[in-house]
Amino acid sequence: RNKRRTSLMVSSVAFVAFLIVVMHSLQVGVFSTMIDMQADLLHGHAQIQHPSYDDDPRVEYTVPRAAAVLDRIRSDPRVRVATPRVMTYGLVSVGEKSVGAMVVGTDPDQDFAVIKTRVDAGRYLQQDGEAVLGSVLARNLGVGVGDEVVFLGSGKESGIAALVATVVGTFTSGIAVLDRSQVHVTLSDLGGALGLSDEVHAIALQLDTYTSSQPLVDGYDGEI
């Protein structure tokens, strides 16, 4: 009965609905970007691990027949990159200085980790016998490009795992806990030092979109 009042009410409702749609779209876009940035940092959108590894990261909790698992998972169209990694904790030493650190063994040609692009001195890994350290860890140890570091830890059969590598670069990821505690070496170097054979601790997956992670996990549940 009052056209002006009706027009104002309809316009108000339409404007509010428009704002809700726009804000929701912005939120989804921002959340998607944040998830992808975090996934690209190291862990990926999903990981294949031993069932007990996440709660208790022991050296012996591995994914066996890693080569076969990699071949199968890489054939899935939702998987853009599948990166095998060996990970352990131990002492990284230079002379009389020793610091506890996490050592990550990776295939530099297959790894998607954005840390590869955050090298601020030297370069990233290219071959066995090389190491890349977080910039804070390198500073604490007093080492730079060209110096040798020694890693000591526990192997799969409870023996001593030892590895000597030459520092070829340092990285600054922007995340303090990574910059002060991580060392990257090649997958074959660390796997050999730990006594692993065709087995890894994790296969990190970069997917076509983060929304594919749960369907992918559900589809392979118990099969790998």
Image (cartoon, rainbow, N blue to C red):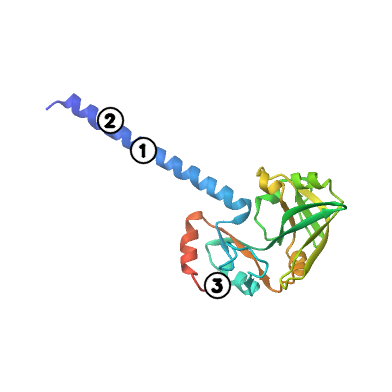
Q: Could you tell me which secondary element the residue under label 3 belongs to?
A: loop
At which x and y percent is residue 214? 47, 60
Residue contact at pointers 1 and 2, CB within 8 angstroms: no
The numbered mark at residue 224 is 3
Q: Nearer the viewer, residue 25 or 149?
A: 149
Q: Which residue is mark 2?
A: 12
Q: Nearer the viewer, mark 2 or mark 3?
A: 3
Amino acid tagged 2: Ser
At which x and y percent is residue 125? 77, 56
The numbered mark at residue 20 is 1
Q: Residue at x 28, y 30 (%)?
A: 12
Amino acid tagged 3: Ile
Relative to 153, say whether 99 is above or below: above
Q: Residue 153 sits in which quadrant?
A: bottom right
Q: Nearer the viewer, residue 167 or 181?
A: 181
Separation (CA) of disc 2 from disc 3: 54 Å
Q: Residues within 10 Å of mark 1 (few under 14, many from 20)?
A: few
Q: Earlier in the sequence, mark 1 or mark 2?
A: 2
Q: Could you tell me which secondary element the residue under label 2 belongs to?
A: helix
Amino acid tagged 1: Ile
Quadrant of the snapshot with the C terminus: bottom right
Relative to 175, say whether 76 is above or below: below
Q: Earlier in the sequence, mark 2 or mark 3?
A: 2
